[in-house]
Amino acid sequence: MCGIVGYMGKKDAFPVLINGLKRLEYRGYDSSGIALYNGDLEIYKCKGKVQELENLTGGKIKSAKLGIGHTRWATHGEPNDVNAHPHISNNGDLVIVHNGIIENCDSLKQFLLDRNYTFKSDTDTEILINFIEYVQKEEKVTLDQAVRLALREVVGAYAIAVISKKEPDFMVSARLGSPLVLGLGSGEFFIGSDATPFIDLTKKVIYLEDGEMAIISTTGVSIRTIESDQPVDAVIHRLKMDLDSIEKGGYDHFMLKEIFEQPTSILNTIRGRLFENNAQIRMAGLDAISDKLEKANRILIIGCGTSWHAGLVGEYIIEDLSRIPVEVEYASEFRYRNPIIKSDDIVIAISQSGETADTLAAIKMAKAAGACVFGICNVVGSSIARESSAGAFTHAGPEIGVASTKAFTAQVTVLTMIALYLGRSNDNLSKSRFKEIAKEIKLIPKKIESMLELDDKVQSIAKLLNKSNNALFLGRGFNFPVALEGALKLKEISYIHAEGYPAAEMKHGPIALIDDNMPVIIVAPRGGMYEKIVSNIQEVKARKGAVISVTSYGESEVKALSDAVIEIPETLDCLTPLLTTIPLQLLSYHVAVQRECNVDQPRNLAKSVTVE
Ligand code: F6R
């Protein structure tokens, strides 16, 4: 949520910042702004997309070597020009951009009001910058010290960047609970909520840790702790990401590009990890905790949204192959409900962004209770990846579209490999069954490729849905979570109300909704549950519901009952989610495009949910 950028160096800051903001727009896109120092502070900000900011600034910008920028996902105060960041302090000297929430902003505001400070916006950020101004005035300290002392009084989460008209040789930035990455160029420095804003300009980065601040000057960066002002020996990392991976590459939308990347992303997920011939999974993260895995009596999987759905698929597969009991929970519930966590529990935390606030907090809680936390993340260097005791990256590549697609299939693939590893470790999975599954996983990318050829067909099926107000997604067994995921995808990008259900639950309530206005999307591949789900389709047809089904090639029974059919290639029952998910992603995509919705940046959403 919210993206922040900063630049100090020899280049013209404006293009660096505006390009950076465009790349961060997936984090929040209700308003944006920029502050530049060119002898004086110049601030431009407005409601709407970064393009609108660029239009607003058109031609007026003087050259500047220092600046900060922000793209917003509103927390305090509605999205409008005034609430957009950057915010300036009362004396006009300091400007700030901020991602996060200042929880004690009301008391800080009262404190400042009592001292005659005034506020133009409804934001917590404007309170913070004025508090920094107040501290600087009272304590007569430099900018970095003022920021540090002020932050010590702050309760909440933040990643900030601050510049001052009076000390233009510095840019100060700090983090607690919200991500911040520094880019180190030659004689130039970058700040970003992630590394995408400056990926084409430097590959050398430092990930700021919680409770740290960076004091950036033209000659270098000094990292210190906020609490005790101690120097920190920061590690410089080298990024492997490239610019192509975060651009649309000829597709109309990032979401479509990411759907089409799945044959490759799954290959990347399994590369060097899945060894069919000797029935082995090689994952350094699993090996690192092998003693704990051996003793594990239970696995708890936590995550949010799509990652939680991947966790549900994981539950079915891990229990099936390893017979270790698995519980799956929303991280947001887990962290607040006093759950039972034992020291021999393995907690698997799943997060594409690696920054989801609830998942991060749940991990900290599980670790404090003595559990071993295994993180499954897509973003290298993210907070969750660093906070986990061990883990595995999904290697799906950057996911920019807000609706998660390739991250989901990569997460399911990692979970399947974990299930194989555990099944072999505790002897619940025979070598021959391992080999059968491993062989089939390797075929999945090619099978997805063949399904992507159905794109035109799915596009025309989408017309059956695009005028609906509601839709029901049904699935059973391994494909129950796929039904949930299909419904989530449709609602988040097309704004059609959709619900996912285990098909057999339909008659316990949702069947009351079925009439000829209720499209029902049924995930019914050949496999253990096939016969049962055919009966469920008959129940829908008997009530005149329009049925769109996703089934295996040649399943004439389902075909005969359906208004539209999307066929998937044959695979093992436990791997069907990797195939059935694909047409549902395409279906949501086309319905959203046909309804003229903003596919990559759906309303009210943000890619990285760094507030609880
Ligand atoms: C849905 C979606 C969200 C995320 C959720 C968790 O398409 O993108 O539901 O899955 O916010 O995000 P991560 O996986 O980054 O923790």
Image: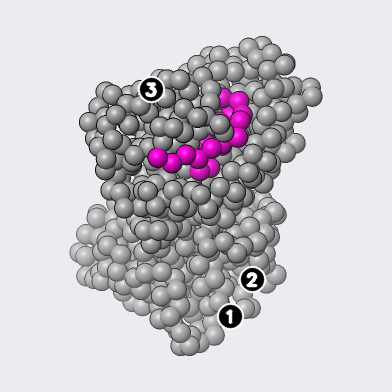
At label 1, the amino acid type is Asp
Secondary structure beneath disc 2? loop
Placement of 395 over or under 107, stated as above or below: above
Q: Is mark 1 within 8 Å of ligand 1?
A: no
Q: Residue 376 carries which label?
A: none
At label 2, the amino acid type is Glu
Residue at 26% across / 43% down in the picture?
Answer: 517
- The outermost residue toward the right is 277
Residue at 43% across / 80% down in the picture?
Answer: 55
> Closest to the observer: 161 or 413?
413
Circle 1/circle 2 CB separation < 8 Å: no
Q: Which of marks 1 and 2 is nearer the N terminus?
A: 1
As measured in the structure, the alpha-carbon distance from the residue carrying label 1 to the one carrying label 2 is: 11 Å
Placement of 125 over or under 608, stated as above or below: below
Q: What stretch is highlighted in magenta?
A: 563-583
Residue at 29% across / 29% down in the picture?
Answer: 542
Residue at image mark 1: 12
Asked if one can make out residue 176 in the rendered structure from this viewpoint, the answer is no
